[in-house]
Image (cartoon, rainbow, N blue to C red):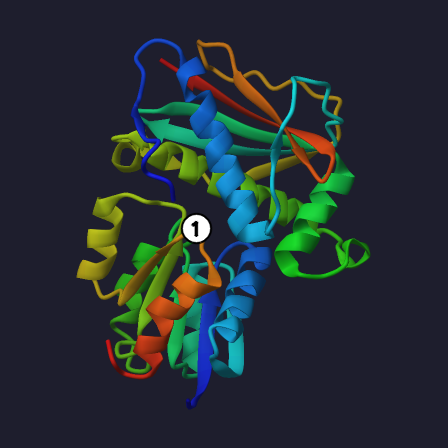
Amino acid sequence: MKKVRALIIDDSSVMRKIVERSLRQAGLDLAEVQEASNGAEGLGALKTASVDLILCDINMPVMDGIEFLRQVQTLENGKNVPVVMITTEGSESHVVQALSIGARGYIRKPFTPEQVKQHVIPLVEGKK
Amino acid sequence: MNKANDIPAPQTTPEEWRPLLVLAAQEVFEIMLGAKLESAPATAVATECTAMVGLAGQLCGLLTLRCGSRSAALMASRMLGVEPQQIDEQMWDAIGEIANMIAGNFKNKLTGMSESCMLSVPTVITGSDYNCRSMADTGPLEVTLLFEGAPLAIAVEVHT
């Protein structure tokens, strides 16, 4: 499997670490992990670096995950990057909304490493 | 999450939610911390950390998680896979996230609430010398559970 550059966006630093650990447990060979605590920081990170995968919370201060998802589609180095939403919000309308504006996956918290693996591995292998 | 135990949101008292609140908390601790929460009789909880998550929409109110600082540090260490001595201010973040996940898991178990109830970002209070006066018009539904032998309390107060 190729080395993966990941961007993890969550207002909880603990959750960012858990997501990173779950990615490693899923078998991803992480070349680089960037962290951001809200959508605006995530967009800022993409101005200086390119990534292969984005995992993004929805409910965050400053800029939430849905707005980030909208804006990342306008970035040259963001529009083709798979974004997986990770959130406590479990409603179907949230899932439909996120998927309709470009999310490639949706993981509900609490989550197991196996769930992360199921959603993320096909994306980085280009099978989804 | 366990959907077999889903029941409709009651119109009268949230006391019917007790088993769902316990289950929601147990699932979060088991999945995210690899820890089992055990039932405990209602008992005094050493409140040094309180995490609060607001509920808005059809279900409107507040969910709180109260515990001692040792328990909060232990939760963070379990979540991060490090020794409790290595935990610093991350414990506030950790119990906020745990409360957030319990609130989300709980409302998703109430039929119809996953769509019509929104969660706030969590807020964490440290210390015990405070009074929390929510606008809820029902008494709190509170459960006491044991985490690694220490009691923690989870409460839901709602506007009807």
Q: Quadrant of residue A55?
A: bottom left
Q: Does B103 sit left or right of B146 as displayed?
A: left
Q: Nearer the viewer, residue A17 or B128?
A: A17
Identify the residue shown where x is 21% and y is 53%: A97
**Is A118 placed left or right of B147 in the picture?**
left
* Residue where numbered disc 1 is placed: A109
Residue at image location 26% in from the left, 63% down from the top: A70
The answer to whether residue B45 is above or below residue A69 is: above
In this view, the residue farthest toward the right is: B85
- Quadrant into which the C terminus of chain A falls: bottom left
Pick whichever, B27 or A55, lies toward us.
B27
State the residue in front, B63 or A28.
Answer: A28
Q: Residue B24 appears at what percent x and percent y?
A: 46, 36
- Identify whether B139 is placed above or below B57: above
The three-letter code of the residue at mark 1 reads Lys
Residue at 45% across, 72% down: A7
Q: Quadrant of residue B69?
A: top right
Q: Position of residue A14 (x, y in %)?
A: 59, 57
- Position of residue A39 in the picture relative to residue B64 (left or right): left
Query: A127 above or below B129?
Result: below
